[in-house]
Image: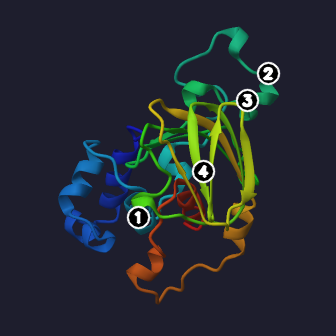
């Protein structure tokens, strides 16, 4: 998990005057787990991270620090040859600046360059051996259209009733409402470029829970997909 995520979650909790026990009760986990997450001693599951972010009202980009710094405020200056032209600063994102999030189930995200409000979620995704996009082997579905190109390794794709194995150089695309799951059954990490389109437009057109809804209703259904988290977090203030 990004080393700044835990402290940001803790700061948001303290700002709202919430105790570990109270936020743990709302999220449905133990207070000790929340403490370990905040101190960077453990990684949350996808559903736990989503529930925490939703309860605390933090956006995904805010949590990962994905907002590019203003011109001239980069902490580590680049060599002149690496500096983009003045008018291109907001279009360039160096690999060392990629926001990173490690999932409990062996999935690593690197958020690639994306403009504010852009129509595409670009991710560099790595599945560790044995890693899966879904907890407990459940197929998931979400809004949008999914594209992927596998750079290295091997990935098993479960798509409805069919199973495919893709290798470096293979690509895929499908409507993400179709039940699907990715699993790395190999012995080496599988890395690929993933792009999801249409998800943000759906999130913007979907009404949020009313103010009278309870805590569980406000959080929505439990999420088991890394991409589902993006969908849910877009609805946050």
Where is residue 21 shown, x and y percent of the image? 20, 67
Element at label 4? strand
The structure's colour scheme is rainbow
Where is residue 226 shown, x and y percent of the image? 52, 54
Which residue is disc 3 drawn over? 89
Q: Name the quadrant of the C terminus.
A: bottom right
Q: What whole-number distance in Å separates the C-alpha atoms at marks 4 and 1?
A: 34 Å
Circle 3 crowding by C-alpha within 10 Å: few under 14, some 14–19, many from 20:
some
Which residue is disc 2 drawn over? 85
Q: Residue 27 falls in which quadrant of the image?
A: bottom left
Circle 2 crowding by C-alpha within 10 Å: few under 14, some 14–19, many from 20:
few
Q: Are marks 3 and 2 in contact (CB under 8 Å)?
A: yes
**Where residue 157 is drawn, which disc sits there?**
4
Q: Residue at x 54, y 35 (%)?
A: 190
Q: What whole-number distance in Å separates the C-alpha atoms at marks 2 and 1?
A: 38 Å
Q: Residue at x 34, y 46 (%)?
A: 7
Q: What whole-number distance in Å separates the C-alpha atoms at marks 4 and 3?
A: 37 Å
Q: What whole-number distance in Å separates the C-alpha atoms at marks 1 and 3?
A: 31 Å
Against 197, is 112 above or below?
above
**Where residue 56 is drawn, which disc sits there?**
1
Q: Residue 230 falls in which quadrant of the image?
A: bottom right
**4 vs 1, front mark:** 4
């Amino acid at each position: 998990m990004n080393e700044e995520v835990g402290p940001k979650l803790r700061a948001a909790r303290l700002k709202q005057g919430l105790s570990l026990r109270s936020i743990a009760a709302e999220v449905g986990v133990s207070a000790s787990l929340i403490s370990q997450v905040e101190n960077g001693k453990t990684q949350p599951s996808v559903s736990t991270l989503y529930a925490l972010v939703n309860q605390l009202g933090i956006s995904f980009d805010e949590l990962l620090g994905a907002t590019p710094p203003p011109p001239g405020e980069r902490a580590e200056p680049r060599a002149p040859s690496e500096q983009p032209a003045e008018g291109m600063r907001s279009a360039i994102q160096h690999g060392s600046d990629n926001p990173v999030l490690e999932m409990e189930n062996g999935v690593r995200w690197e958020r690639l360059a994306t403009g504010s409000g852009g129509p595409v979620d670009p991710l560099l995704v790595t599945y560790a051996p044995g890693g899966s996009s879904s907890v407990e082997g459940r197929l998931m579905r979400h809004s949008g259209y999914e594209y992927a190109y596998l750079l290295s390794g091997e990935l098993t794709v479960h798509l409805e009733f069919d199973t495919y194995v893709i290798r470096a150089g293979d690509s895929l695309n499908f409507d993400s409402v179709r039940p699907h799951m990715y699993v790395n059954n190999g012995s080496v990490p599988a890395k690929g470029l993933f792009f999801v389109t249409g998800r943000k437009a759906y999130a913007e057109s979907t009404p949020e829970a009313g103010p009278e809804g309870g805590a569980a209703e406000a959080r929505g259904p439990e999420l088991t997909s890394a991409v589902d988290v993006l969908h849910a977090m877009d609805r946050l203030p």
